[in-house]
Amino acid sequence: MTLKYYGDSKQKIVVTFIQGEQILTTEGRITKDGALEYKVPEGIKPGEYKVSVDISDKE
């Protein structure tokens, strides 16, 4: 997957971590070199997670 940088003010990025019944979300951003950057949500524990990234235009 290739991410494209459009500027912080134009995109809203939500990263969701799912492990069993635990669902944690955090906001992220795309850096100018195309990397996804986000803060690890509070309460996350070591283990395997399904990760969902939703990218939408800010309104």
Image (cartoon, rainbow, N blue to C red):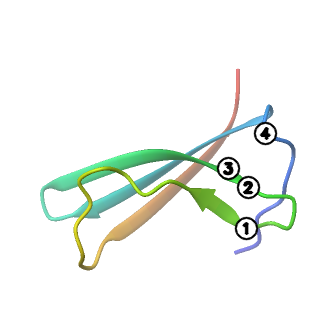
Tell whether 53 sits left or right of 32: left
The span from disc 1 to disc 3 (Cα, nearest Å) is 8 Å
| Residue under pointer 3 | 29
Viewer-side residue, 10 vs 42? 42
The span from disc 3 to disc 4 (Cα, nearest Å) is 7 Å
Residue type, numbered disc 2: Ile
Which quadrant would residue 13 be assigned to in this image? Answer: top right
| Residue under pointer 4 | 8
- Are the two marked residues, 1 and 4, in contact with CB atoms closer than 8 angstroms? no
- Are the two marked residues, 2 and 3, in contact with CB atoms closer than 8 angstroms? yes
| Residue under pointer 1 | 35
Looking at marks 1 and 4 on the same chain, the residue that comes earlier in the sequence is marked by 4
Toward the bottom, the furthest residue is 48
How packed mark 2 is, by other alpha carbons closer than 10 Å (few <14, some 14-19, many 20 or more), is many
- Are the two marked residues, 3 and 4, in contact with CB atoms closer than 8 angstroms? yes
Query: Does 26 sit above or below residue 36?
Result: above
